[in-house]
Image: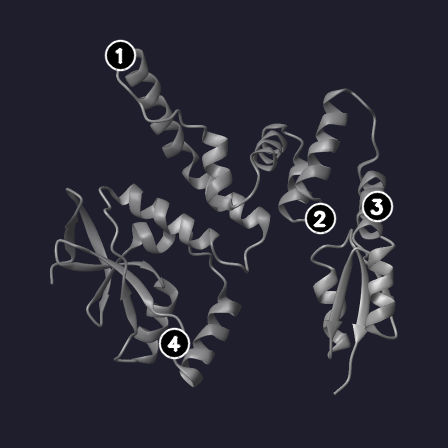
């Protein structure tokens, strides 16, 4: 195969071709974060257990173009694993930007990403969403019918699976120019809401001690996120607590170790807990 392929009317250099799959750097480097330690662990795991998740590809001009799993494929190449599990994604991609947009949405659906990480990914496509909104405005000005105006922040919120207000606050923090607050938010030492509130104070020329403010916020967050648990002797005691509205939910389980993990998902709720034995 030639080192150059044509995709969506443009020529691209082939990075790798292996097991019938083709990669290009424009996609491989788009979301991949260099993590030598993580790569080493992944490589060891694949060498021992094989690949758990298939490499995802889309077919363009009879070329199986990899759109997810570049690192897994690279590992297979280095380990000389001949049979690479792969799955085709059938989407009507018109441009490479469409593919990149899909890659972002696919990554944001993964549960192991934090809210900040999802927003960072979603904002990579902010310009594309803004361009769609601009085209809609032009069409509307020409008297053409448009299905629905594009709200850039709302579209980003949908991708990241967060509220529009969260996206708006995140962007205002980034645009504030207050590097210390921005850095701490991105490192997740501050929540988006806490960072936004600090920016609002700074904007109003309120003098704040950032370290002291953060310590206060962390204490308040810890207190608000500690669930209230009451262990009961039997179901009737639990039922009475619920009927009198002293507690809101009942957890019944054999495994006491899972109680706090479950309750921490809704920390502001009071739980009655009944541990039953066989």
Q: Is residue 231 something one can see in this rendering?
A: no
User: Which of the 4 quarters of the picture holds residue 230?
Assistant: bottom right
Please give the count of numbered marks on the rendered protein: 4
Q: Which of the two labelled residues, at mark 2 and mark 1, occupies the earlier sequence position?
A: 1
CB under 8 Å between callouts 3 and 4? no
Q: Residue at x 80, y 37 (%)?
A: 210
Q: In which quarter of the image is the C terminus?
A: bottom right
Q: Which of the two labelled residues, at mark 3 and mark 1, occupies the earlier sequence position?
A: 1
Q: Name the residue under label 4.
A: 51
Say which mark, if any, is on residue 62: none
Q: Name the residue under label 2.
A: 189
Q: Mark 3 points at which residue?
A: 220
Residue 53 rendering spot, x and y as whole percentages: 39, 70
User: Which of the 4 quarters of the picture holds residue 2?
Assistant: bottom left
CA separation, marks 3 and 4? 43 Å
CA separation, marks 4 and 1? 53 Å
Q: Mark 1 points at which residue?
A: 142
Q: Which of the two labelled residues, at mark 3 and mark 2, occupies the earlier sequence position?
A: 2
Label 2 element class: loop
Q: Which of the two labelled residues, at mark 4 and mark 1, occupies the earlier sequence position?
A: 4
Q: Which residue is drawn at 34% across and 56% down?
A: 28
* Extreme-bottom residue of the structure: 278
Q: Around disc 4, counting alpha carbons within 10 Å, would you say few (fewer than 14), some (14 to 19), or many (20 or more)?
A: many
> Of the residues tagged 4 and 2, which is closer to the observer?
4
CA separation, marks 3 and 1? 53 Å
User: Which of the 4 quarters of the picture holds residue 271?
Assistant: bottom right
Residue 162 rendering spot, x and y as whole percentages: 56, 43
């Amino acid at each position: 195969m030639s080192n150059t392929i044509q995709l969506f009317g443009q020529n691209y250099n082939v990075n790798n071709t292996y097991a019938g799959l083709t990669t290009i750097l424009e996609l491989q480097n788009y979301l991949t974060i260099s993590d030598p330690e993580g790569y080493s662990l992944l490589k060891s795991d694949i060498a021992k257990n094989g690949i758990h998740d298939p490499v995802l590809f889309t077919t363009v001009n009879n070329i199986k173009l990899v759109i997810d799993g570049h690192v897994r494929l690279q590992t297979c190449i280095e380990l000389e694993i001949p049979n690479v599990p792969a799955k085709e994604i059938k989407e009507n991609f018109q441009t490479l930007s469409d593919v990149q947009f899909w890659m972002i949405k696919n990554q944001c659906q993964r549960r192991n990403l934090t809210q900040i990480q999802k927003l960072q990914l979603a904002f990579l496509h902010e310009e594309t969403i803004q361009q769609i909104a601009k085209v809609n405005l032009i069409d509307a000005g020409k008297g053409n019918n448009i299905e629905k105006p594009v709200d850039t922040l709302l579209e980003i919120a949908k991708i990241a699976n967060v509220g529009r207000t969260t996206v708006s606050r995140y962007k205002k923090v980034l645009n504030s120019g207050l590097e210390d607050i921005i850095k701490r938010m991105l490192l997740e030492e501050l929540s988006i809401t806490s960072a936004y509130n600090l920016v609002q104070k700074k904007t109003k020329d309120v003098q704040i001690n950032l370290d002291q403010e953060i310590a206060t916020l962390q204490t308040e967050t810890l207190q608000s996120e500690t669930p209230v648990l009451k262990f009961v002797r039997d179901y009737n005691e639990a039922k009475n607590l619920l009927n009198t509205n002293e507690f809101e939910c009942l957890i019944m389980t054999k495994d006491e170790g899972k109680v706090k993990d479950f309750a921490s998902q809704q920390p502001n709720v009071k739980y009655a807990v009944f541990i039953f034995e066989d």
